Image (cartoon, rainbow, N blue to C red):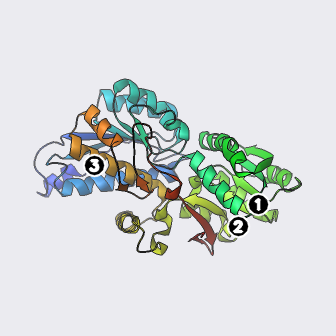
């Protein structure tokens, strides 16, 4: 579905709840609302729609209504590039939010950079913002950070030798490379290294190789989509019996449902505070933010919240703050985004600089463990 969505401005006008004028600030988005990454893109799209409606119902930004122009790229990088070009050339948006996956994001970047339009990505790879690109920002924690958080936890558990089984998609390959780049910093050695295609329906051969490798103390699975759920089920079936770590790319209740409660028991992964809103201490500055977003999203959509929708929430709120300061001129918006400090979001507390277009550190991650089909915080 190649979907062009504008906000509910027309509906609000019909009800007499908005001024009879066209939106004055256009925000663009190209997301993977359908296709293999829809479990990421669908909550992102619903979050943006919800937030734009809320802002317009409250009078807009500095009295100006927002219009959300959103396309569904289905996870296809070529479509994402085409839609980004359309957003810039035809729709004349002030900024772009999107790039659900690393692949679609990397195809949008040159379009945004050439047009000098601020672009806030919702994908994980560190390559998106390292090296820094003038017009490109992102909200999710990087894959390098996920590796570091996982290896910190392994180190605390005395793990020194691990097996790794990675997806060959853009996310899996990037995280695999990042993990290999930092693993030595934690005194850990990768002694078995397997891969799988995201379309594979069984990873038993690779996991059998890992199980039969002498000395392994834990296993890490960089990947997202259905692959990690299959890995988790096969892992249980093979009775590997070692700690299993997954990536932040599966930080949603959907992963537990796909893997099965029994197979997912004990799996650890780094994730944002959003997944554990109810068990955060009241002193945590994120508690009010993540609780309000979760409650609003679930009431609006009737579906469980996920960290992926949270990435879109943070991107929109950062952009909203920039628009409030800078108006609708792209260069001023870019500068205001880069100047974001102390923003408390679903992913952590963001402090961007000219050298850091993410603005998060490792404290933004919680290490979670699945127990009885739900998330718990590893202390």
Q: Is residue 91 left or right of residue 114?
A: left
User: How far apart, in angstroms, are the residues tagged by discs 2 and 1?
Assistant: 8 Å
The front one of 100 and 330 is 330
Q: Secondary structure at mark 2?
A: helix
Q: Residue furthest top?
A: 114
| Residue 26 position within the rendered picture, expressed as x and y whole percent measured from the top left | 25, 39
Task: Please indicate, yes or no, whether residue 373 appears anywhere in the rendered image.
Answer: yes
| Label annotation for residue 235 | 1
The structure residue drawn at horizontal position 39% and vertical position 45%, both measured from the top left corner, is 352
User: How far apart, in angstroms, are the residues tagged by discs 1 and 3?
Assistant: 45 Å
Q: Looking at the image, do the residues carrying marks 1 and 3 touch, with CB atoms under 8 Å apart?
A: no
The structure residue drawn at horizontal position 18% and vertical position 40%, both measured from the top left corner, is 24
Q: Secondary structure at mark 3?
A: helix
Q: Looking at the image, do the residues carrying marks 2 and 1 touch, with CB atoms under 8 Å apart?
A: yes
The structure residue drawn at horizontal position 76% and vertical position 65%, both measured from the top left corner, is 236
Q: Is residue 179 left or right of residue 143?
A: right
Task: Please indicate, yes or no, whether residue 225 appears anywhere in the rendered image.
Answer: no
- Mark closest to the chain's N terminus, 2 or 1: 1
Instruction: Determine whether 119 is above or below 39 in the image.
Output: above
Question: Residue tagged by mark 3?
Answer: 321
Q: In the picture, which quadrant includes the N terminus?
A: top left
| Count of residue discs | 3
Query: How many residues crowd mark 3 within 10 Å: few (<14), some (14–19), many (20+)?
Result: some
The structure residue drawn at horizontal position 67% and vertical position 54%, both measured from the top left corner, is 151
Question: Residue tagged by mark 2?
Answer: 263
| Residue 279 position within the rendered picture, expressed as x and y whole percent measured from the top left | 49, 74
Query: How many residues crowd mark 1 within 10 Å: few (<14), some (14–19), many (20+)?
Result: many
Which one is closest to the eye, mark 2 or mark 3? 3
User: How far apart, in angstroms, are the residues tagged by discs 2 and 3?
Assistant: 42 Å
Query: How many residues crowd mark 2 within 10 Å: few (<14), some (14–19), many (20+)?
Result: many
């Amino acid at each position: 579905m190649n979907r062009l969505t504008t906000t509910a401005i027309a509906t609000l006008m019909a009800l007499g709840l908005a001024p009879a004028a066209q939106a004055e600030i256009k925000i663009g988005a190209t997301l993977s609302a359908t296709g293999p990454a829809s479990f990421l893109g669908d909550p992102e799209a619903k979050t943006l729609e919800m937030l734009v409606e809320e802002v317009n119902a409250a009078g807009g930004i500095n009295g100006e209504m927002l219009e959300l122009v959103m396309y569904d790229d289905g996870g296809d990088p070529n479509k994402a590039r085409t839609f980004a070009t359309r957003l810039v050339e035809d729709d004349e948006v002030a900024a772009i939010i999107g790039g659900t996956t690393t692949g679609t994001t990397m195809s949008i970047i040159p379009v945004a950079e050439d047009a000098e339009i601020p672009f806030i990505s919702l994908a994980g790879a560190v390559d998106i913002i390292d090296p820094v690109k003038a017009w490109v920002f992102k909200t999710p924690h990087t894959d390098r950070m996920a590796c570091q958080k996982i290896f910190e936890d392994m180190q605390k558990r005395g793990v020194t030798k691990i097996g790794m089984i990675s997806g060959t998609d853009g996310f899996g390959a990037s995280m695999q490379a990042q993990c290999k780049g930092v693993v030595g910093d934690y005194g850990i050695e990768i002694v078995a290294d397997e891969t799988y295609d995201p379309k594979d329906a069984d990873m038993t051969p690779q996991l059998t190789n890992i199980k039969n490798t002498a000395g392994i103390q834990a296993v890490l699975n960089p990947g997202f989509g259905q692959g990690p759920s299959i890995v988790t089920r096969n892992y249980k079936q093979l009775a590997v019996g070692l700690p299993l770590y997954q990536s932040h790319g599966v930080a949603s209740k959907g992963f537990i449902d796909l893997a099965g409660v029994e197979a997912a028991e004990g799996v650890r992964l780094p994730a944002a505070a959003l997944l554990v809103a109810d068990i955060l201490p009241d002193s945590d500055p994120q508690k009010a933010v993540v609780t309000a977003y979760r409650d609003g999203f679930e009431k609006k959509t009737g579906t469980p919240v996920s960290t992926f929708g949270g990435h879109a929430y943070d991107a929109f709120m950062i952009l909203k703050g920039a628009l409030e300061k800078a108006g609708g001129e792209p260069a001023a918006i870019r500068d205001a985004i880069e100047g974001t400090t102390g923003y408390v979001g679903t992913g952590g507390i963001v402090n961007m600089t000219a050298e850091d277009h993410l603005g998060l550190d490792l404290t933004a991650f919680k290490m979670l463990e699945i127990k009885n089909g739900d998330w718990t915080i590893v202390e």
